[in-house]
Image (spheres, rainbow, N blue to C red):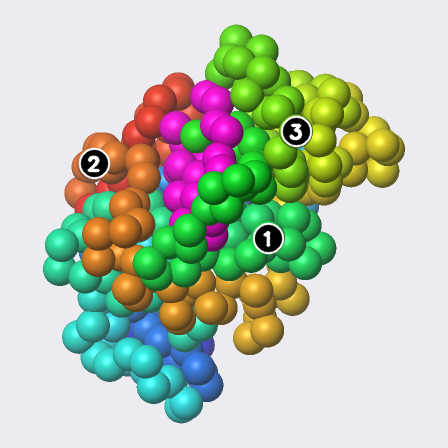
Amino acid sequence: MAQHPENQAAWLNASKSALEVGPAPYTHPGPDQLVIRNAAIGINPIDWLKQSLGEGILPHIRYPTIFGEDIAGTVVATGEGVTRFHVGDRVFALYTIAREWLTCPLPASISFEQGCALPLALIVAGLGLFGKEYLGLDLPTVLARPKDEIRPGAIIIAGGASAVGGTAVQLASQAGYEVISTSSLKNFDLVKSLAVHGRELVGAFSLGDGIADYLADVLNSHEGPVNKFIARAEGKHDVLEEGDVVVKFILISPQVIGPDTPLRPIFEDYLPKALDGQFVPRPTPEVVGKGLDQIQNAMDVLRKGVSAKKIVVQL
């Protein structure tokens, strides 16, 4: 593949090695794709986990490889069939070569640094909440769908301060559900007391080690109508995945993010309007450097632990 004179990447050349900045192939957009010049990159736990664990996680990845799921920037080229975007548009997307249906315009009121916190969080939260293989909830609307004032359907979302959790909270709330959220294990007694009031409990969304175990206890003890299903974004647990409470890992694969993805209406119909004040990118970005050579530093910062922050590198 031809090299572009300005195209560079931060490469992982071997398992557990440090990233190295060097030339990268330039990929022209195919049908329904766009090329985005990145302005900000968000760092995710899977990035440093893959570097640290090597073949112990995502063994299908071959080296050399380029990390990165969360980006925001400017469209520089569009492929055949792209109608929603034009060169020069500000966008956020899941990949640098982006699928049109998983890309959204970024309004001027939202910075690239804020925007790059959205893509992976939206994919994980949206799939877990609205995918038919998961919780299968009603989609969010603009304006937010009114809640049933007599007996609103409720959902428990753990890790509400995280990027995925905070996104799930907003999506579920704007879809018309009452959200019961927690950010630590010590709050689960409160969650249990809030949930058990005879209302319909439509399921739970889990992030973090041991969280699914607590959620299963809440679902099993619920005194009203209940969907005993937990969509699990991350974290270890002891609940039998096909037991009385079903626990299903939210798996992002080429099939579920293809043209027929349940996420398409979120990116195409809901977000372009909701980002004008109704939906707010979360969490707050923390810029730790500028340039590809700062990505390794950013991964190290995230590995040490952050709270309610999205680690970002500017380009």
Q: Pick out the residue farthest to the right.
A: 243
Marks 3 and 1 sit apart, C-alpha to C-alpha, by 19 Å
Residue 214, picture quadrant: top right
Residue 81 visible to the viewer: yes
Where disc 3 sits, the SS reads loop
Residue numbers of the magenta segment: 161-183
How would you rate the neighbour count of disc 2 (Cα within 10 Å): few for under 14, some for 14-19, many for 20 or more?
some
Taking the spot 49% from the left edge, 68% from the top edge, the residue there is 264
Q: Mark 2 or 1 closer to N-term?
A: 1
Q: Amino acid at mark 3?
A: Gly
Answer with left or right where residue 136 lies relative to residue 166. Answer: right
In the image, is residue 241 above or below residue 254? above
Where disc 2 sits, the SS reads strand
Task: Find residue 194 and report its horizontal and vertical position in percent.
Answer: 55, 21
Disc nearest the viewer among 2 and 1: 1
Q: Mark 3 or 1 closer to N-term?
A: 1
- Residues tagged 3 and 1 counted as in contact (Cβ below 8 A): no
How would you rate the neighbour count of disc 3 (Cα within 10 Å): few for under 14, some for 14-19, many for 20 or more?
few
Disc nearest the viewer among 3 and 2: 3
